[in-house]
Amino acid sequence: MVITHSAMAWAHGREIAARAASLGSDVVELPGDRVVLPKAADKRTAYKDAKSTLAVVVAPAGKRRLQPIPPSADWRFDLAEGCHAHCQYCYLAGSLAGAPITRVYANVGEILDDLAAYVGQGSVTSVSQARSQEGTTFEASCYADPLGVEHLTGSLAEAVRFFGAWEAPVQLRFTTKFDGVEPLLGLAHARRVRVRMSVNAAPLIRFEGGTSPLAARLAALGRLARDGYRVGLTVAPIQPVDGWREAYTALFAQAAAELEGIPDLDLTAELITHRFTPKSKAVLQAWYPGTALDLDEDSRSRKLTKFGSTKFVYPAALMRDMREALSTMIGRELPSARILYWT
């Protein structure tokens, strides 16, 4: 782990460094604020070195300026950026530039204090009749998996306590592929927090290296729901693999078994299909040259993003078939779940 000079000036940054040291990690205090890894012998080594590095930094003012994040939430804010897992379809490959170092922020208090200016604004839940009960929604760290490093950072717990004490129509949201929820249990969240577990059909979990097993994720979601948290399933990225109907039915049945009998269960589902850009495809194939992930452009439809770049999605007829099938499965296996969106 490395920590910048500026991050050491923040109590939260020093606490992260102390936790890492107590767990046996080497903590390197940098003389300045630049995070630069030693030059690696080749690209594969550079990737591995970056993926295994945690950097504690200070989020500058530009990083603290919130951005909308439809269709999930009104706004996104970052407790961290980057992820140490090895998901072969990781969307961060086309979203973040540079070495895939995980950066966590020392100035969490400052980040949270900035949120008040955005209450009552936004284009998703703030203006939606269907989701108005969620209030103004804030997505934490969509460019990271904050729970995966929570044992070091404590940042999610800080955010949960902050929202729990915030007497306003607001909701904290985050999604994860990890099961280490113990630091969040017993916190005074006031049901202003929704934790969604990122899940997929069993044949696709093999593409999610370094994450918690599917059964462990669902069991963790059950623990959170029993602790009063609002919960959800982020089913992503949906892919029509062989036997996909049976595989997704089994997924929802497994989730139903874990959540059965929980009082006041508030459950949502977000359904996200697989897509990729030429840039993300190139990055992912460089990171995982032996991947069996389907990145065949000829079997996809080409679309333009809102920024004018190209992305490859499933053909419209297949999208309709998958949407209808998964919606029916959820209605049968998890009848109390609200499907927030399909994309």
Image: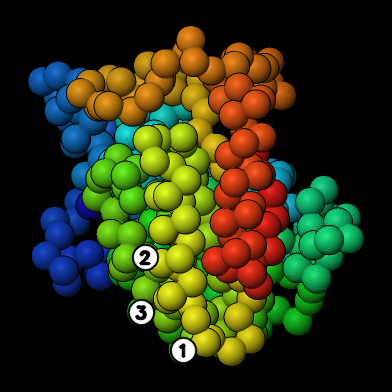
On the image, numbered disc 3 is attached to which residue?
A: 182
Q: Quadrant of the C terminus?
A: top right
Amino acid marked by disc 3 = Glu
On the image, numbered disc 1 is attached to which residue?
A: 186
Q: Nearer the viewer, mark 2 or mark 1?
A: 2
Of the numbered discs 2 and 3, the one sitting upstream in the chain is 3
On the image, numbered disc 2 is attached to which residue?
A: 217
Identify which residue, 325 or 55, lies in the foreground: 325
- Give percent across and percent down for residue 237: 48, 41
Identify which residue, 276 or 294, lies in the foreground: 294
Task: Mark 2 and mark 1 in contact? Answer it, CB < 8 Å.
Answer: no
Give the side of residue 273 with respect to residue 208, left or right. right
| Mark 3 Cα shell of 10 Å, populated few (<14), some (14-19), many (≥20) | few
Tell me the element at label 3.
helix
Residues at marks 2 and 1, CA–CA distance in whole angstroms? 18 Å
- Give percent across and percent down for residue 33: 37, 42
Give the side of residue 179 with respect to residue 259, left or right. left
Amino acid marked by disc 2 = Arg
Of the numbered discs 2 and 1, the one sitting upstream in the chain is 1
Give the side of residue 105 with respect to residue 288, left or right. right
The image quarter containing residue 272 is: top right
Residues at marks 1 and 3, CA–CA distance in whole angstroms? 9 Å
Tell me the element at label 1.
loop
Query: Residue at the location (86% across, 56% down)?
Result: 128
Amino acid marked by disc 1 = Gly
Residue 134, placed above or below residue 82: below
Give the side of residue 20 with respect to residue 257, left or right. left
| Mark 2 Cα shell of 10 Å, populated few (<14), some (14-19), many (≥20) | many
Q: Is residue 11 visible?
A: no
Residue 37, placed above or below residue 40: below
Query: Residue at the location (46% across, 35% down)?
Result: 240
